[in-house]
Amino acid sequence: MSNTLRPYLNCVRASLDAAFCLRNFPSQTVERHNKPEVEIGTSKELILNPITICRNEKEKCKIEPSVNSVRVSIMIKQADEIEEVLSHKFTRFLCQRADQFIIMRRKAIEDYSISFLVTHAHLERMWKEKLIDFIIDFMEDIDKEISSMKLAVNARARVVATEFMKEFVA
């Protein structure tokens, strides 16, 4: 992990640790229903203030806690057009397979690349620390993955351009 990324991820980790203090809270309007309040939003008193942690303008994390669920949305770094295309394709690929990532949402909230939804039921079945580690590792790995894909695209473009220019030299 780079030195510039470490304080950002430490802040996200501490905020997630505080936000993941969830409890079972059934619906106040429908009997025997237990829906994530952060998604439904019927009772404003059950939704806490959202936390936005920014590394820069293009890279941020939004944590929206409620009494029984937390929505974590991540904006992946998109410094140029290549990174925008790569991150869009990569996040679309992951969201299509959201069922295999138990906490991933199929559709991210507006202005963010990818979102996770953690409910009290997830915390009853899984370790809180392991969920936090997964989200932090995901944030680290997706940044590395997009950077490596960008390098691969640039290397391939360089080879194609060299082969193309050989026709004009000869």
Image: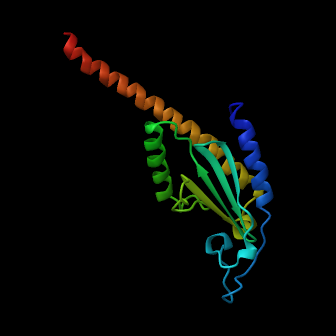
In which quadrant will I find the N terminus?
Answer: top right
Q: Is residue 92 left or right of residue 56?
A: left
Query: Residue drawn at (60%, 51%), measured in percent from left and top?
Result: 74
Residue furthest bottom as drawn: 31
Q: How many marks?
A: 0
Residue 143 location (% of width, % of height): 58, 39
Residue occupying the point 76% across, 58% down: 128
Q: Nearer the viewer, residue 170 or 62?
A: 62
Placement of 99 over or under 135, stated as above or below: below
Q: How is the image coloured?
A: rainbow
Which residue occupies the extreme top position in the image?
A: 170
Image quarter where the C terminus lies is top left
Give the quadrant of residue 104.
Answer: bottom right
Asked whether, in this view, residue 98 is left or right of residue 68, the answer is: left
- Residue 122 drawn above or below residue 166: below
- Foreground pick, 75 / 149: 75
Percent from the top left, x then y, of residue 124? Answer: 75, 67
Q: Is residue 41 left or right of residue 80?
A: right
Residue depicted at 75% across the width and 78% down the height: 25
Horizontal and vertical percent position of residue 32: 68, 87
Q: Position of residue 158 (x, y in %)?
A: 36, 23
**Above/below status of 35 relative to 115:** below
Q: Residue furthest front?
A: 57
